Every structure is written in C-alpha cells, then in structure tokens.
Image (cartoon, grey):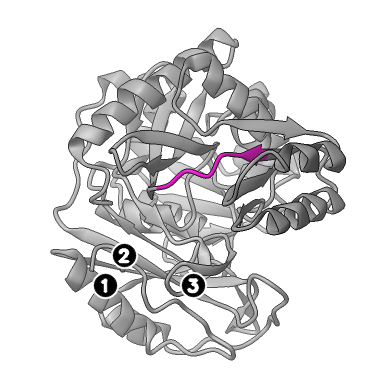
Amino acid sequence: MKVLVVGSGGREHALACTLLKSPNVEQVFCTPGNGGTATTEGCKNIPLPVEDFERIADTIKENDISLVVVGPELPLSIGIADYLQSQNISVFGPTKAGAQIESSKTWAKDLMNDAGVPTATSETFTKAEAAKAYLSEQSAPIVIKADGLAAGKGVIVAQTLEEATEAIDFLFSQGFSKVLVEEFLVGEEVSVLALCDGVTVVPLLPSQDHKRIGEGDTGKNTGGMGAYAPAPVATPEIMKRVESEILQPTVKALQQRGIDYRGVLYAGLMITPEGEPKVLEYNCRFGDPETQAVLPLLETPLDELLLACTEQKLARQPPLKWKQGSAVCVIAASGGYPDAYQKGYPIANIDTATAAGAIVFHAGTSIEREQLLTSGGRVLGVTAVGENFKEAIAKAYRAINGIEFEGIYYRRDIGHRVS
C-alpha cells in the first residue's frame, strides 16, 4: 500500500523510514517533507503546506494512498483529521476536538482533573496582573506555561519569582490569551507515546527527552536536543501504573466528552522520587525527538498498528515486538538555536555517519541544486542502536562527530542519566 506522512521534521523522516521497512508498504509520500525524505529510497516529497487540506486530499486520491499519518500538532489542531475523514480517507491522528489535549493546556488540565489523573496543581489566568498576584502567594521554582501551541517552547521553569514574573509578561506579549501557573514537580521526566484507537490504548517503549540547550540540562528550552529509549526510570511496575492510572482513565474521559481519539496519546510524565508517575503535559502526536529513538527498536510493522488504530481494531493486535537493546538520538542543531540562527549551510559527511552504524534522520534540511543544506534550527537526528546504552551512546557520538556544517552544535551528554 501507499502511505502519506504529513510534516517536514525528523519525526516525519523517522516515520517514513519505519513505514518503509514493512513488506506491506510500497511507497511513502511526504508533504512537504525535507532533504532526507527527498533522498530516501521509496519516498517522494509533495511540496504542499500542511494547512492545505483540499490539495492534500486531492493528492491522496490521485496517488491511491491508503493511509495518512499526521506528524505535527498544527494541522491536527486545525482539523486535518476531520477534513480527511469527511473525504472517506483513513487518517492516523486525532480530530480537532481531540487535539485540544495539546492545543489547550487549560482544556487538558480540566480533562485530567475530571479523570482523576495525577498531575501538577495549576491555575489559569487571562490577565498578567492576576497571574502575578497569584504568584506572590507561591514559592519558586515554579512553572509558567502558555495555553496554546508553542512548538515545544511554551514552558518556562522559573527558578525565582522574578523569573516567573518575567515569563508571564513574555508569554502574554507573545499573543497567548491564557497562561498557566503550575506547581513545580521534582523527579525524572519520561515520555510515553501510546497508540490509541478510541477505546484501546497501547504504550510504546518509554523514552527520555533532553529539552535544555546546554549540557547538564542548563539553558533555554528547545524542541528537544536528544532522546534515549527505553528509559530505565520507567520500570515495568511504573508502566503498569501509567496504563491503569493515566492512559486508560484519559481515554475514558475523552469518550465521555464524545471524542473518538485515534492517534498518538503522548504523556509527558514526571516520575517523583517516591516512584509516583504524574502528568506534566499531554501531546496529540508522536514526540520529536523521542520518535527517532523509539521507532528504530520497533519490530512490529508500524503500518499494521496505525491501520488498526484507524479501524478501531487495536485490541486484536498481538503484543508489540521490540529489538533487544537501547537506542540514543543526538540532535545536531544550527548555531544560535533556539534563538536566531542562519540557514543555507552545506552539510557534509552524512555517509560517514551512516557507515559508522548510525541512522541519520533529517529535520531541518533541504536540497537545492543537488546540494544538501541546513534549513532549520534542529538539523539532524543521529540515532544509534546498541546492545546497551554505553554502546549506543558511543556509536551515536562517533557518527555525529564526523558530520560537518557551519555552526553545528550538539550536546555531548545525551543519555548522561544512564551512561
């Protein structure tokens, strides 16, 4: 069959490569795709904006595409799944109503509270003055969150109340109509990407992202500078609790609101020092870069799982099969990211990285006049699989050390909690 992957990042390249491993998949189209999907055998880019639902639907029909997999949150939040379903097109990704779990943190928090899901306490404000008045009664550290989509950069962990005040002013100045002031949870973060068909929910391997730009988890938040899987902190016992206390009650609460949620339910968790899992946030799609670390370990054909979700047949699927070992993804970013950065620099030695045993997923790349160039803040995700974390980390860094482009930056401590 033929599959369309909507999006242009490293997550979408990883989805395309994983789908192509299946004997059922003859071709993957990517819209708009990137330099990696343009050069992957079996892939073809279709340069359409992710918001152009009508032309995307026309492309699906013209190319006899059987399944659409939506990568980013933006098209989901504005209703791409609703539109495609109205055209009798099979799509993996929640409707606009379901995508509120990411597009509105206030809505998601209300859902969690209704479902009895353990999460941080918070208050929502529409005025900066009211938020600051509430802040004066709190203690630091404290978390300030934008209510809407912010490309993974709408969460500010303030170490002082002064920083929190500045964060409130900043987020309102960026046009967000609501801001949450939230309890700071202590512990270790884990990402659980779960497949959902509206009734059944099946978690993938737990992973851990590295959000901060600097080594030692310092500096500004980014879209993610690297990830590893499976995250040891999420023990089998904790994962059972995540299923029973978090994922299943959330799906039930969605059903009670009349939402048939078919897609990824991404739970960003904090595992407290007492071993209690609590939800930091929900997302409505595959994580980036967690996907680049999780999918290389998956042995079950991905297309079969995604189709089962669209057909509400996930409960009939046999248990997921995984490779033994560990995977680590290190992000190579443009100099200056997550602030201003330059684009258009030639990228060299990707072949050397793959020869070193790594998988190189493209994120912010493009091809112009047959030259691979940087085109984004996060440029590449260099992933390696090993028998253990030590081997996977060493292999990933051997590979990324040889890649060259002007201003290349990457953290040198991805996986430091397990290495």
What range is drawn magenta here?
A: 181-186
Q: Which one is in front in this view, the residue at disc 1 or the one at disc 3?
A: 1
How many marks overall? 3
Q: Is residue 182 magenta?
A: yes
Badge 1 or badge 2: first in the primary sequence? 2
**Is the residue under label 3 in contact with that under label 2 (CB below 8 Å)?**
no
Percent across and percent down for residue 375 are 65, 74
Check disc 3 and report its element: helix, strand or loop. strand
Instruction: Give whichever of 32, 202 is nearer the camera.
Output: 202
Q: Which residue is mark 1?
A: 393
Answer above or below: position of 116 versus 11.
above
Badge 2 or badge 3: first in the primary sequence? 2
- Could one spot residue 260 in this view of the protein? no
Q: Quadrant of the C terminus?
A: bottom left
Residue located 29% across and 54% down the image:
229
Q: Which mark is residue 362?
A: none
User: Would you say the magenta stretch is mainly helix, strand or loop?
Assistant: loop
Residue type at tag 2: Val
Instruction: Give whichever of 374, 63 is nearer the camera.
Output: 374
Badge 1 or badge 3: first in the primary sequence? 3
Answer above or below: position of 127 versus 350.
above
Q: Is residue 12 magenta?
A: no
Q: Which mark is residue 328?
A: 2
Quadrant assignment, res 384: bottom left
Q: Which residue is mark 3?
A: 380
Residue located 26% across and 48% down the image:
233
Check disc 1 and report its element: helix, strand or loop. helix
Percent across and percent down for residue 360 are 40, 71
**Is the residue under label 2 in contact with that under label 1 (CB below 8 Å)?**
yes
Percent across and percent down for residue 95 are 62, 27
* Mark 3 surroundings within 10 Å by alpha-carbon count, few (fewer than 14), some (14 through 19), many (20 or more): many
